[in-house]
Structures are given as C-alpha cells and as structure tokens.
Image (cartoon, grey):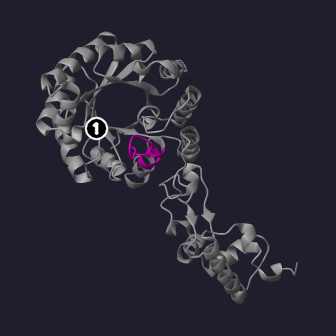
Amino acid sequence: MDKIQINDTTLRDGEQAAGIVFTPEEKISLASLMDAMGIPELEVGIPAMGGSEAEAITVIAQLGLNAALLGWNRAVRSDVAASIACGLKRVHISVPVSDVQIQAKFNGDRFLVFARLEDTLKFALDNGLFVSVGAEDSSRASDDFLLEVAQAAQEWGASRFRFCDTVGILNPVTTAQKVGKLVQGLSIPIEMHTHNDFGLATANALAGLQAGATSVNTTVNGLGERAGNAALEEMIMALKHLYQVDLGINTRRLRELSQLVVAASGYTLPPWKAVVGDNAFAHESGIHAHGVLKNPQTYEPFAPEEIGWERQLVVGKHSGRHLVANLVRQHGITLNREEAQFVLDAVRTLSVQMKRSLTVDELLNLVPNRRMSHGII
C-alpha cells in the first residue's frame, strides 16, 4: 500500500458523463490545480477526438506540469498518432476482454484482440511512449482470458495493466479475488478502474489496492459515466485515515477542486456527498452537536480544515438546547435553561413549517427581547 499512486481521469472519464462538457479553459484550470495539489498522473482526454479536445490536451502538455500526462486510445494506430501529435509521452491503450464487449466491437473474434493490441502497442513503443494497457470489462471476462491478455501486454512491453470494472458489478471480495490473480501472474503494476453503479467504486478500488494493485483511477466528486467513478477525494482521505497511507497530496485544496469541478460541470453535489459535500461537517441533531461542541472527534472522522472546509453548526428540527444556547451566545446573548428551551421549541416549530434548518438571523429573531449578558437590547 505504500507504493500507491493516483491517476486521475476527471478530464477523460469524468467528462464522459452524460451532459458534461468542459471548455478547453476549464480543462486547463483543472489540470493546473490538480498538478499544484500534487496529483502525480492525469489522464487528460482522448486525442483522437480532435478539435477542441486535442487543442486543450496540447496546451496542457505544453504547460510543463509535474504530473505525468496520459492520453486514452483505442487499439488503433491513428489514435496513438493523435496522442503523439498532442505532445503526449504516455498513452493508455484499451481493448475489450469480456465476451459481450468482444462480440460488440470485434465480432466475437478473440484473435483480433491480440492482433490489434500487439500492433498498436508496438507502434507506441517504437515512438518511445510509456504504454498502459486497459482491459475493458475485466470484471465480466473469463479469468483465464484476462490473464492471457495481461501477460501478452506485459510480454510486448506494456508498463502497466489496468483492471476495469466497467459496469460496476463487483464487490470488494470478488474484486480482491480477481485482482489478486493478476498480481500473482504479472510483474508489471496493476491499476484499478472502478465504476459506481452499485455504490461500491471506492470500496472496490481500495480492495484492489489491498490485493496488490498499485495505481488507481479516480475522478473529482466521483464524476463519470452512468453512476460515476471512484472519487478522488474519497480515495485520498480513505487511504490517509483508514490505511495510514499519505500520498503527499495537498488535501487542503480538495474542497476548492471539488467546487471547480461543480462549476465546470454545471451540476451541484448532494450536500451529503462524502468528504466534500456541504453537510460533510454540518451538525444539527442535539446529541451530535452537543458532542462536537465538547470534542469534534466525537462525530467527525477528521478535521474539516484538512480538506479546506469548515465545521457548521445548524439549528433545526433535531437541534438541542446546548446548540441553541451556544449559537446565540456567539452573538452576545446569554440564555438560561428556560429561555433556551423556549427558543428551541420555537426553532423546531418554525423549522417544521419551513421544512429546512434556520438561518442565524431567523434564530436570533426567536430570542425573546434579545436579552444580552450585560443587559437588554
């Protein structure tokens, strides 16, 4: 686990989410921020698309970023040529490995999988490129066939092999079993690429890393096709706090990065989104707020400052007297027990009527006479 690296694919698989379009300027801004944070590798797009996509990739390649930049390609020479034209030195070549994908793309011809991969991979190597090979739909492929493709890629000079749970059908146990077999059969690093169709993308990616994979694809906010991918912020913080693996990434800019992707994608996050959601460090219920006021560790797995966010204490239907009294005290108003209960009852009534928590002004307006510790206002 101490050799893990992130390969973020927000600019490729993230943008492939239905309805998402990043402008070249947005792709450049996202790449620059992720690089500044210390993300070691970025999958920057699909050069073969041409147009503004290729233009953005070319500009990013010319920025002199510290991050390694990777272009995504089909097993087609012209795709790799397009990556070279954009100035990329690293390419990812994807081939289908499940029967359903091979039937759809290669008319069921498994021999063609090997022929196309060998031709494209050797073309890339002849041009001095780092080559990662991806097995599309690894999770639904025959284990024996998957290993055969992976070993062929390794023999032909691939530097990394990507295990793809393309439609997100695995669980952590089955992921570990399948990835473990690849780890035993290969000497090159294995990369995890997981989708979130059953809400298990991050868990499955972590299971793959525990089984011996050393690279993991992520996207900011879990953005991606269908239900999305393993979320960058979840992966970084889970590794740091659950596995004591610090990747050396500046986590204090995670919230900033999340909001930049929100702006670029045009889609807001649910407030309960793990790590970077608005409510990730918001406390309303009486028991939780009381505990957090005494010691934040009672109900927070890590401090909000670690991801560039802040703790929020919110009054609403589930609040208690301690929180109400604490919040009004911050505005110079001291309540005794009876007064705090009176305000709390009023808070709960109004919150139910409005179907939301209250603003600070709404809370203060419920305080009788706005009594202050040094007198009456």
Camera-nearest residue between 163 and 224:
224
Camera-nearest residue between 163 and 206:
163
Q: Quadrant of residue 92?
A: top left
**Residue range highlighted in magenta:** 221-235
The quadrant in which the N terminus is found is top left
Q: Is residue 332 left or right of residue 67?
A: right
Residue 31, given in percent of the width and then of the height, sits at: 52, 30
Q: Residue furthest top?
A: 126
Q: Which residue is located at x 28 percent, y 49 percent? A: 207
- The answer to whether residue 366 is above or below residue 48 is below
Q: Which residue is located at x 39 percent, y 45 percent? A: 230
- Report whether residue 373 is seen: no
For numbered disc 1, what is the local secondary structure? strand
Q: Which residue is located at x 26 percent, y 33 percent? A: 136
- Report whether residue 197 is seen: yes
Structural crowding at the residue carrying mark 1, measured as other residues with C-alpha within 10 Å and reported as few (<14), some (14–19) or many (≥20): many
Pointer 1: what residue? Answer: 164
Residue 228, given in percent of the width and then of the height, sits at: 40, 44
> Does the magenta run of residues contain 232?
yes
Residue 66, given in percent of the width and then of the height, sits at: 50, 26
| Disc 1 residue type (three-letter) | Cys
> Does the magenta run of residues contain 284?
no
The quadrant in which the C terminus is found is bottom right
Q: Which residue is located at x 38 percent, y 37 percent? A: 5
- The answer to whether residue 297 is above or below residue 4 is below
Q: Is residue 247 left or right of residue 196?
A: right
Residue 116, given in percent of the width and then of the height, sits at: 22, 18
- The answer to whether residue 371 is above or below residue 124 is below
Camera-nearest residue between 208 and 116:
116
Predominant SS along the magenta part: loop
- The answer to whether residue 83 is above or below residue 355 is above
Q: Quadrant of residue 122?
A: top left
